[in-house]
Image (tube, coloured by chain):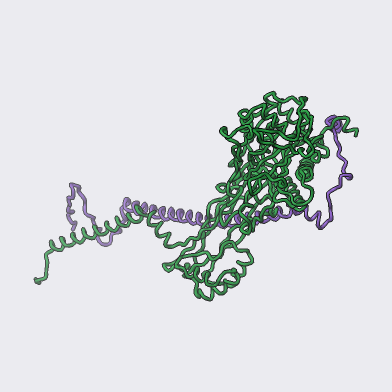
Chain colours: A green, B purple
Amino acid sequence: MSEFAVSRKTVRVRLIIGFIIAIIVTFSLIGRLAWIQIVRADELYEQAWEQWNHVIPVSTGRGSIYDHQGRLLAGNRQVYTVAAIPPQVEEPQAVAESLATVLNMEKQNIFDIITLERSAVYIKRKVEPEVSEAIREMNIPGIIFFNEEKRDYPGGDLASQLLGFVGMDQGWSGIEVYYDDYLSGSEGKLLFPADAWGRQVPHDFNRTVQPETGHDIYLTIDETIQHIVEKELDRIMEEAVPKQTLAVAVDPKTGAVLAAAARPSYELLNYENYDSELWDLSPFTSSFEPGSTFKIITLAAVLEEGLFNPEEHYYCPGYATVSGRRINCWTVDRGGHGDITFHDSVGASCNPAFIELGNRIGAEKLFEYIHAFGFGSITGIDYPGESSGMVFSPEYRGPLELATTSFGQGISVTPLQQVMAIAAIANGGYLYRPYLVGHIEDSDGDYVFEHKPQMVRQVISNDTAEQVIDLMESVILEGTGSTAQLEGYRAAGKTGTAEKLDENGVYSSSDFIYSFIGFAPIEDPRIVLYVAVDSVTKGPRFGSYTSAPLFKTIMEESLNYLLVAPSELPADDEEQ
Amino acid sequence: MQQQARQLSLSGRVISPPSYPSQGVAVRPEPGRRAKKVKLFLIITLCFLLSLVVVAQYSSLVIANYRLSSLRTELGAIQDTSRQLELEVARLSAVGRIDQIARDELGMVDPELDQLRIITAGRDLGNRLGE
């Protein structure tokens, strides 16, 4: 027997030990495999996925904006973003040189971008299709493209301040920023597998996770009325060359804004070339002294309190003296209105008569009505940066403040506040909250938001509203607003000439804001319209030549467009 | 010589060792053993067929996914085109553009007051016309 010979028993023991070791190793491997493949599978897959795939975010498809009839005001068009995968760019210097001219960028700038130590970088976003096509034809390795969308406005700059503009990916002003959460969808992704050096794996495919389009917004604005308003504002800018002019129109029964614009304005696609003050819609964001249009509020208050007798006489000497200060009527140069009834004082817009009415109701009560009509606080319109205006707080309401407030000086209100207050009179006494967005739809056409008319409060009774309307009609028929008389429609309105403070803080005797506020037709008011022309520099400087005709033209064209039947005129008028 | 069968005892169970036929005698496999083989064959075949079905299912799923993906891409392209067309329609039918063409290209002007006849049709007339 050999000395190396081992017994069968030893062999068997060794085999068993070997077998046990093999079993342990095998089960350890199985356990490890299960640990990796089952327990940590998700986590490791995620890590591996991030290593394999490179991601370039793709901006969202922004929701469109329509008018209340579904006419497109702001949509999107296809543009392209030029990006680079730096590890794949073979000759960065030459590539930078080639792209610089086409992309209108500095060569060094492009070189710096495409040599960054990143898996993917943007070179230039949202370039026009012809630019991207020119680069595609160069067939440069490492330069990739993907689709994006850019705002486009089929109506040009119509309603520019109202719509607002969009920066690279999000709204910056107007409706675009106020409803940005609804308009912006979810971000998409461009995915491509790459090796350890970031080079795109050949024969594999790119995958695009499509961005989810944002919701579509349907405004209460009517494109045609908006166009009429802007056309007329442009005309007055050309004819009277004022510092600015503005208009806002609402539906008195709901508070829905039908049109709102101001001039000067800005170009939506060149917003960066304009003063940022022009980006805002001044009828909502700016406040100024209203002037005589505010007399309607005083009138409504004294009528509601039973302190107004239209047949009562008042003597206007052309001024009133309050707390030792002389406050002039606009007729001071011709000795005032003289003997006048309170009924006629409305049509004649007599300041001293309204100072008297203000005294009768008193500061506390008058300011109660002023606040009830919505002045001194924001209306809550769905537009960013709304101004609340300024009215006197209780501690500052002396006799002088009461007097000036009674005829619309010394306080500051927005055109929107005024138009909503007059809408409350037009609809029988109910103050509504104004709104710009009617409803919002998702991509399936389902409503995700709907604006229902929201009544804030009843301010005056129906009877009082009717009396105010009668007096406002007299302003147009026989008072200062005669040039606002509409062809075929009965209208109610009030002129306003607000004095402006000069640089020394003194009321200017030559610089005015001419305004007009009113509604039509009286029997079933469809539109309440406020117009203002600030600092006319050319032609006649009277409200009757500027703001009143502006009101007339906009209102007539709008009512004709809405196919509103002409008013039924009294028999004697018809015969004439 | 007939070999005496040796009995092995394992775990108390008695197993008879296989008996070998003598030379020249045709031996037929035991019926139980053949049945087992058939059963095993059938099970393997069934498993194979089942795996084929599973693979086929996965395959059709992948194909369906691929088709879905291309249809989605196609849908996206159609929606893009639709949006571009909507934009173009809106651009062509914009009120401002029509107004401008009417004035600048067609020479149209707003009517003068004497060219207008406002018909103040009362409610009665409206009702009569309605009849």
Tell me how many marks there are: 0
Q: Is residue A143 above or below residue A384?
A: below
Q: Is residue A243 above or below residue A89?
A: above
Image-based side of B28 in relation to A291, left or right:
left
| Relative image position of residue A445 (x, y in whole percent) | 62, 45
Quadrant of the image containing the C terminus of chain A: top right
Quadrant of the image containing the N terminus of chain A: bottom left
- Between B16 and B47, the residue placed more toward the observer is B47
Most extreme residue toward the top is A306
| Relative image position of residue A459 (x, y in whole percent) | 65, 29
Q: Residue at x 43, y 60 (%)?
A: A50
Image-based side of A88 in relation to A101, left or right:
left
Image-based side of A282 in relation to B27, left or right:
right
| Relative image position of residue A395 (x, y in whole percent) | 56, 33
- Between A46 and A358, the residue placed more toward the observer is A358
- Between A258 and A186, the residue placed more toward the observer is A258
- The answer to whether residue A331 of the structure is visible from this angle is yes
- Between B33 and A521, the residue placed more toward the observer is A521
- The answer to whether residue A554 of the structure is visible from this angle is no
